Structure formats: C-alpha cells, structure tokens
Image (cartoon, rainbow, N blue to C red):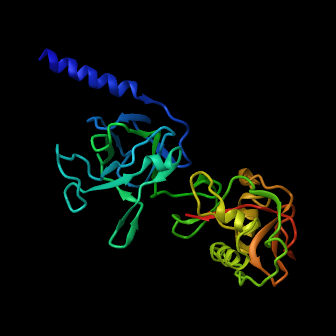
Amino acid sequence: MYFSIIRFLCVLYILITTISFAQALPANGKSVGVLHVSLQGGSNSRVQWLAPSATTYKIWLQIPAGSTASNAKYQLHLKGNAAANSVCSSKNKRQPCFEITINQAAHQGKWLLLTQQSAGQLINQWAFAKGGYVSVNASNVRTNQQLGTAAISFEDMVVDVNIGKRYGGGLVFYVNNTGKHGLIAAATDQSTGLQWYNDGFYSNANADNNAIGAGKTNTAAIIKSQGVGFYAASLCDRLILNKYNDWVLPSKDELALMYKNIGKGAAGSLKNIGKFSNRGYWSSSEYDNESAWYQSFADGGQDKYDKYGGFAVRAVRAF
C-alpha cells in the first residue's frame, strides 16, 4: 500500500511538472484541458483532451520546437469510454477509434491538422459524441525522444457565420444560401503595390471568369500561365496565414462584394471593418492579354488596367 501511494505521487508529479500554458490558439480553435505537454518516450504517460461538445470538429495540434518524437500516435475516440487496453479500431461501431501517427521532429513549431486517408478519401473532420476525446501516450516513442503538444484546438465545423465575423483565418464577406459556406478575406493587405503579371510577361492566362467563387480557378490559371515569380496571384497562392494555406486572388465580383460588405461600401458597424486602404486592389479576373480588372476601395468603382500596374493585394479563401 505504501509503495503504491509513493508510485502514484511520483506519476502525478511528473505530469504536473510537464504541463504549462502555450501561446495563443489559431482563429476559431477552442482550447481544452491541458495545453502544453511534454512526455518522456518509453514511459506510460498519457494525456487526453475531451471534445468541447458533441459536434463535428477539425483537430489542430501545435508541435513544440523541442519535440523529437518520430512516431507520436494520436487517437481519436469519437464516442469516448474506451475500455482499458482496448485496440484502437475504426471498425468498432460502438467505440470507433482512429489512430494518426505524427512525425513531430519534422514539424517542430508548426500547426498540424489531424487527417487520415480511408478508402481513397481524405478525412479531416471528425464527428464527436458526448464524451469523445483525443489522446496520446508515450509508450511507443523511443526512450531518447520527447513527445510534446504545445496546444490542441477543436475547430467547430457546424457553425452559422455572419458577414464581418472573424472566422477561418480572416473576415467573412460572403455567405451562400446554406448559411454554412462562403468566402473569407484576409484581415490585412498582403501587398500595398504589386504587379499582376510575372516580370513583364504578357499572356492570355484564360482567367477571365468574373463570378463569385471564380477566384480559385482564376488563380490556378494565372499560376499555370505565368509560372514561378513574385506577382499578385503567386503571392496569394504561396500565402500561409493563421494556419491556412488555400488563399487565392479574388475574382472581380468577389472584390465587389468585399467593398460592399466589409469595405467602405458597407453600412453601420461593418463599414470598412476590413481596413482597406483607398488604393485599387487587383482581381484575378483578366480582361485581355495586357490588362486585368481592379477594384477601387476609395469609391467602389471597377476598371481594367495594364498588368504592370502596382495595385494592392488582399487574399481570400473559401469555407
């Protein structure tokens, strides 16, 4: 009995001394329980994070700079209540469990999204029931390695969003009729003056779609035509902001909505909540070989201009 108490106190001490608070969470993430964890490889140390509620989440992990574990195994127990020593299996209908291995040494200091390939499909959203949780243990990690988690956040994927809301790495400026999907603008400019083309290379990029939702295909067409370089579309395409890397250069109609909904054309508290300057902003919508459309955020007007022009750039992404 005496030795059991001593062993319990030692384990408790180890857990307490390896827990500390981490830096701020990414946009939309909900922190839960322990934030900063450092576990010694080969030990039986284990940590779990209870899902905030019964809903669908994306799970984000922030890997500390000092983590060296090459095979950290995170388990997602969607319905919770896993029996002791039970095998983690997605085929267990009563208590489904998904195991995802992360090479922490290769991703130090980065946010990672927990994903898994299943039957040719990429799974990155997880439907948790009440009591569902995420866990990790160090028993399978080499004894000379450290397993760490600087932060974990649960991004609620079943949400109603409104124009002007901070969400998905920026500001919502368009919501479709489902109320669940739309477009987000970065909260600040990516450039105050950058050319549309790639260092004097005029071409027809076949990026002439003006419609809402066309920014993605336009940007891809521009990159394919213009190649590697530093210009408006490539700047958005390479952007990693608030953990997201799927930013694009907005289309002509998308820019018009940005001006109307979160720019100086908006009403009340939404008026220029996006903090746009009075400059012109490039769209991804091409007019011809030599010119493309831009949006004035001073007066809301749109016009075409030579692709060498140095207009501002504001990236957008879909949700």
- Most foreground residue, 213 or 147: 147
- On-image quarter of the N terminus: top left
Residue 187: x, y in percent? 69, 53
Residue at image position (67%, 56%) is 186
Q: In this view, does 248 lie above or below 187?
A: below
- 16 left or right of 258 in image: left
- Please tell me in which quadrant of the rendered image residue 290 appears: bottom right
Residue at image position (82%, 84%) is 289
Residue at image position (19%, 52%) is 87
- 208 left or right of 98 in image: right
Residue at image position (55%, 70%) is 177
Residue 120: x, y in percent? 36, 73
Please identify the residue farthest to the front as the structure is shown: 144
Residue 317: x, y in percent? 61, 64
- 50 left or right of 216 in image: left
Note whether residue 34 is visible. Answer: no
Q: Is residue 94 above or below residue 68?
A: below
Note whether residue 79 is visible. Answer: yes
- On-image quarter of the C terminus: bottom right
- Most foreground residue, 223 or 53: 223
